[in-house]
Structures are given as structure tokens and as C-alpha cells.
Image (spheres, helix red, strand yellow):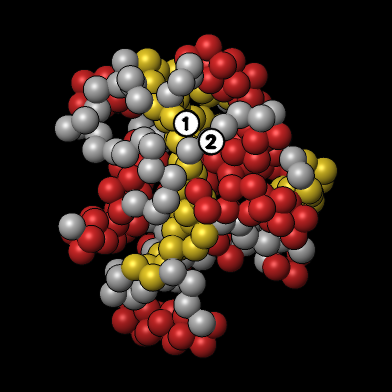
Amino acid sequence: MAGFPFDSLNPGHSPVNALALARAAALAYSDKEAIEKTIRDAWGFSGFLSLDDPGTDTQAFLAVNDDMVLISFRGTQATHVKDLATNVHIKLVSGPAGKVHEGFLGALGAVWDDLIKFIRNERGSRALWVTGHSLGAALATLAVARLRLESVELNGLYTFGSPRVGDEDFTRAFDADIKDQTFRYVNNNDVVPRVPPRLSKYDHVGTIKYFDTDGDLHGELPWLEKLKDRLEGRWEDFLKPGTDGIKDHDMKNYITNLEKAKAASA
């Protein structure tokens, strides 16, 4: 559709789908009224549900059109990104298919009943797509893992600036099931994908898509090449206002790079 160009039946990587889902992840930061107006009036979706749990500050929206159900989880507010990167609680507890981050699991649980009820009532034969940025990316990942344990078919997951979510057992089980339909975007020196640390037994899931310091898109880079690129990114940012790792986490920068990737693929 014109307002939300998307190939709902393409399980492989798609720059068009990536950009659309990035915009959905960005939209999740808006208030309920603005989200619904965009979803219905600009993007042409007919069904809509807003999820909001004040106790955990978990927010997400679900939208339905003729072809798909879209789930987008809100991430960490920009003013709190540093807190997520430096003060994240890292306790691992039993979760779907392995041990996962206790706080992320609790946040998802707070909205789970309403989420799964909406999917079961509204999905029918529609495709199901999930997205999120930052904390929202972590919740999107856990939601996919839990949906798969409940035998819900997924078409794809795209995340942006995601922290690590679970341990190696969780990653192995997740990737064995849906790695080829999971695309995890990381922008150069974005600090959030580096937490919680690997030393705390956390690991990443999915197929990485990496933006270098010039905003060019790559798959997994060799360790030394990635280190060089990150150092170049820090050098280019030297003496500029703000922190490079926080600025690279900004969803606006992901969208700018995705627009470039889409144009290059056309």
C-alpha cells in the first residue's frame, strides 16, 4: 500500500521492509492518539490496539490491515538511554527456551495477555511482523520467542539498537527456529547493543545488519574490520557535542541509514 510500502510475505531481508518497520518502531514513541492517526489515516491500517502498562512503563501498539498484523514495541525514551546502557539490571532468569533478562521478561509479561488475545482474535490468515528499537527491540525479541513456544507462526522480526536479551541457550534455541527471519540492525558505535555484557553470559540473536561510520550497510564484519570502523566513527565524532554511542543509538539515524540502503538497492 502507498502509505506503508511492505511485502508481508517476504521472509528474507528486505530494505523496503526494514525501512517500513523502522518507521513503525519510531512511531511507537508517539502518544496513542498520534500513533492511531498515523496508522489509520497515513498508513491505511484498519485495526489498532494500544498497550500501556504504567507499572512497568511497557508500551506497544498492534495494527491490522488486509495483509498483516504489525506489532511495534516502544523503546527507551531518549533521556533514559544512558541509564539503559550503564545501569541495566542483568539478572538472568528462566524464560522462553533459556535464561533471559529478568526486567525485560517482566515488562513483556505485563502486556502479554492483551497482546496474545488480539493476535488470536484478529490475525486470521494474515502475516505477523514484529519490530522495536532499544528496549522495544528486546521486548520484540522476547515476544517472538514466546509466540513461537505457543506455536504461533511468525513472518519476521526486525530490531534496531537491541540490547542482548538472553543467554547462549536462549540464543541457540531462538536462532535454530527463526534466525533467517530475524534481522538485528546495529549502527556503528551504538552503545546499547553492547549491554548487558557478554561476561554476564548474555548473547545476541538473529542475523546482524551493521551500518558503518559512513552509513553503509554490511552483514557481519570481521572483528578487526569492525573495530577499525568503530574507531573511525569515534574519531569523526571527536569534539562534537554529545556522545557518539548515544547519538548512534538515535532512531532517526537508523532511519536515515535505511533510506540510503533502500535507495542503493533500488
What residue lies at 42% left-to-right and 51% top-to-bottom? 12
Residue 256 locus on image (x, y percent): 25, 57
- Residue 179: in sight, yes or no? yes
What percent of the width, then of the height, locates residue 258? Answer: 29, 56
Circle 2 crowding by C-alpha within 10 Å: few under 14, some 14–19, many from 20: some
Residue at the spot of label 2: 154
- Asked whether 77 or 37 is in front, the reply is 37
- Name the image quarter holding residue 244: bottom left
Q: How many numbered circles does the render carry?
A: 2
- 192 lies left or right of 259: right
Q: Are marks 1 and 2 in contact (CB under 8 Å)?
A: yes
* Mark 2 residue type: Leu
* Residue, disc 1: 128
Residue lying farthest right? Answer: 94
| Alpha-carbon span between mark 1 and mark 2 | 5 Å
Query: In x, y percent, where is residue 179?
Result: 57, 53
Residue type at numbered disc 1: Leu
| Label 1 Cα crowd, 10 Å radius (few <14 / some 14-19 / many 20+) | many
Q: Does residue 81 appear to the left or right of 42 in the view shown?
A: right
Q: Relative to residue 163, is residue 24 drawn left or right?
A: left
Compared with 203, 244 (above or below) is below
Which corner quadrant holds the N terminus?
Answer: top left
Disc 2, SS = loop
Q: Quadrant of residue 129?
A: top left
Task: Tell me what residue is drawn at x 61 percent, y 29 percent.
Answer: 152
Q: Quadrant of residue 211?
A: bottom left
Q: Earlier in the sequence, mark 1 or mark 2?
A: 1
Is disc 1 placed on a helix, strand or loop? strand
Residue 36: give x, y in percent of width and height: 32, 21
